[in-house]
Amino acid sequence: MSNEITISVNGKSETHTVEGRELLVDFLRERLSLTGTHVGCDTSSCGACTIHMNGQAVKSCSILAAQADGAEVTTIEGLASNGALHPLQEGFNEEHGLQCGFCTPGIIMTAADFLQNNSNPTEHEIREALEGNFCRCTGYHNIVKSIQYAAKKMNA
Amino acid sequence: MEKRKEIFPFGIPGHNLSEIEREIPNDEPPAWPVNDQLKEVGKRVNRIDARAKVTGEAKYTSDMKLSGMLYAKFLRSNIPHGSITSIDTSEAEKVPGVHGIHIITKNKEDGMVGNEYPEIKYVGQPIAGVAAESLSIAKDAVAMIKIEYDPKSFVIDLEEAMLPDAPLVFKEPIQRQEDGGDVGVVHDGSKGQGNLRGPTTSSFYGGPRGDLEKGFAEADVMVENTYRTQVHTHMPLETHGVVIDWKPEEMLVYASTQNTAGVRNELANYFELPKSQVRVICDFMGGGFGAKHSAGSFGPMAAILSKKTKRPVWLMIDRKEEHLAEGNRPSSIQTLKIGAKRDGTLTAIQQKSHGTAGVALGAGVGRIAQILYDCPNFKTEQYDVLTHAGPGAAWRAPGNVQGAFGVEQAIDELAEKLKMDPLALRDKIDKSEVRKVERSRGAELFGWSNRKPAGSASGIIKKGMGVAQSCWPRFVTLNSSIEVRILNDGSVEVRGSVQDIGTGTKTILAQVVAEELGLKTTDITVRIGDTLFPDGPGSGGSVVTQSITPPARNAAYEAKMKLFNQIATKWETEASKLEAVDGFIIHKDDRSKKIPFKEALRGMRTSQISVTASRSNDYGGFQQPWGLAYGDLGSVQFAEVSVNTNTGFVKVDRVVAAHSCGRPLNMSQLESQVNGGVIQGISYALYENRVMDKGTGHFMNANVDQYKVPYSMEIPEIEVIIVEEYGALSSTDAYGIGEPANIATAVAIANAVYNAIGVRIYEIPITPASILKALNKIYE
């Protein structure tokens, strides 16, 4: 079964005919070549595929493309505005919040949603917010620092 | 090669820093001073590839999209042992969008008994591959392949596999080690009987020494116990895989690999192609931790499918396949017997181990028992036990992480018997100068003096402190080359096949070259992970930094001297009178005479100066016939835990990790590496465990939710101490830190748990159930 759907991705309207079983993550990666959204587990456990749908962080491996019909989607590629990095992107650079970087886009998208709702979080709150994102390399400490960096910058 | 003498910094700043004279090849640069006198090296420099990673621009292998590319999927065995009697692909071939199917047949190694299909030896063994226009079509087609098996009896449990009537995994002698394995240990699968292969009695540096019997006779105190460690998997967030475009003139391979040159060699060898016709590229890769050295079965499969379909083929495996078939740290059951005199002097160490790497070899427990402490009488016997399970692979400090779990608990037990502080005992028996400094600096930061006697904590939640040590050889890959190009617009490029697996190799190369040329790290373009460029080392065994940064500095130096020669002629002086500092080339005797680096390049005779340099012997001439690994890196880690004696729940509260890696190149990257090693150690101690069903041979938690790994909430405060240690061994004198970072963590936690509850846990993972059992609160 195929459906024609329209999704606004990073501000651009995208209309495609998709199979019923097509996942949103595959729609973004395969059809739109937005490969910054990664696949780490296929079971919604690792968070590497986190994007924003209608302003909320969601795991795009657990949503059908058809479910996102009419939605506004932001991926890591759409986070910087006019070439200026988002404070979180800047923070992950400044605080060494990454090593291999494979989990990074998902973590940044999770954190971006989190900071919208909690602009002055404690370290504990940041760690709680990251519970759906797995990082095998860094030990999370510098990820927390990167988010603190961004929060401070966004509040300044 | 003509040589000259140079004076180098030698020793540990703040402890015993001095100088040493070394003879060095004439074409190598002058000695660098200690780090605080350098501008780029040793500093907290940002990663040069971070921007690409935070914007999503970084292209990993799984992100590659080539024109006309097909997607491939493996069909894997669903039984642990048996023969395939028939494979029917006729229905799968009819699926619209399917372009190619390949069935794996026997090669010479498999022997020629029976039909053409290799015997199935574990659940998840690859059988066939399908290439189709999308991954979902490939999956549909895989599901339509019909296989008939003739199942055979199998064995999953290590101890059952050793029984005389156990089903055999291999009847024949084996040499193969699926992917890396235990560093430095020569495995001989032809020794031994049935599923029990070995023993290995010698590890890297040595083997049996002295007289055990005499040593034990001299002992006043003995410790003898058995320690058990589980199988855990690597779980890099990007799975294994390749994208291969086999064109008539070249096989182009994008690989998520720790070793581009190794994968090229493997594929060239497999398909009998000249190395010059295989190109392997790995620009960004999502972690490996030891499991990604090889082309695996996915490399040849993608290549064959690409050849058959004449189209590029994408073949990344999924998370379940990754768990089943692409490596794990083998288990171990180790018996250690240690004898000591009343003052702590060790008299004998006897070690015997059995471990299973499934269908592969490499389940030894390393060399840590043999090398960490001074002991005149030593013997080890390390056995591989074959089982019907997925193959093991090198996993961050292979063997030594398991080995440390035994040795460093035994030393803790010995200290208690001797009524000595565990650190004081180590001061007595450990000859390493750097670990002495690490113990002292670490103990102070950690607050070791607040440690209380074992089991003396009151209340339901009991706190405890533990310590453990590690060592790791300074392995050097001598076949390590790199090219530095200075272009006539003033830009500088570093090129090599060495890859950055996420540790920051690109950044340290830029730092080293920038320091030599008087530029900024951000001025240097680093193009690595491509076999079009000179061969570098694989990213394993913590070899990269010491293997590739000296040739990078040497190449930059030689290129600089060529440039200086041209400028010196113009300035009517000698090249030796010039230096490159802060973006300028300056006349040392008349500092008003200077020219910006970029401008200096404009008048060059050719549009580029290109120099390729290779790793030379260590200064001091320590190369041996078997290679180069002079001396060891050391570490000491301290852990504090809270144990809830009602629920059995263990929480690690703090870790202090003191490490050495020669001259530190980038403090932030080193801290990240140690943090990562520590969390993997915590995870190994408390969470991760491959659960196999003995009745079916299936891996029951081959996913991310039931295979327990730590998320942000489980991670304690980690404080890292990097001890600068100068050895005057190369032009950078810098070493890697990845492997040593996670050797000591799990056993430091085990020692802390003992200190908290007064009962020792001899098996990891330490779960709530194992704590409650140890406290006699639940019974099996």
Image: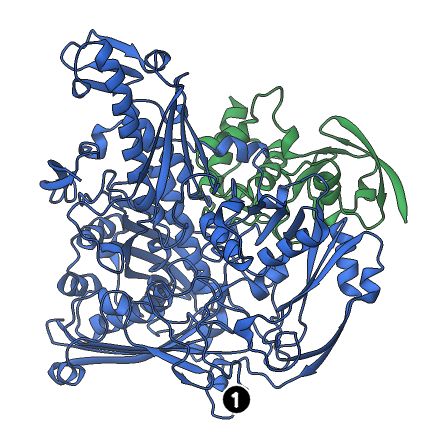
Q: Using a 10 Å C-alpha cutoff, classify the residue at mark 1 as few (fewer than 14 neighbours), some (14 to 19) or many (20 or more).
A: some
Between B676 and B420, the one lying in front of the other is B676
Q: Quadrant of residue A141?
A: top left
Display colour for chain B: blue
Q: Secondary structure at mark 1?
A: loop
Q: Is residue B475 left or right of residue B103?
A: left
> Which residue is painted at 45% across and 80% down in the image?
B173
Q: Is residue A2 left or right of residue B353?
A: right
Identify the residue position indicated by label 1 in the image.
B166
**Total numbered circles:** 1
> Which residue is painted at 66% across and 49% down in the image?
B314
- Residue B454 in view (yes/no): no
Q: How is the image coloured?
A: by chain
Display colour for chain A: green
Residue B26 percent across, percent down from the top left: 17, 35
Mark 1 falls within which chain? B
Between B143 and B563, the one lying in front of the other is B563
Task: Determine the residue located farthest toward the top in the rendered image.
Answer: B592
Residue A8 percent across, percent down from the top left: 78, 30
Q: Is residue B525 left or right of residue B586?
A: right
- Answer above or below: position of A42 versus B348: above
Task: Determine the residue located farthest toward the bottom in the rendered image.
Answer: B165
Between B776 and B307, the one lying in front of the other is B307
- Residue B567 in view (yes/no): yes
- Answer above or below: position of B775 versus B32: below
Quarter of the image with the N terminus of chain B in it: top left
**Which kind of residue does numbered mark 1 sit on?**
Ala
Residue B667 percent across, percent down from the top left: 33, 38
Residue B609 percent across, percent down from the top left: 35, 24
Between B577 and A143, the one lying in front of the other is B577
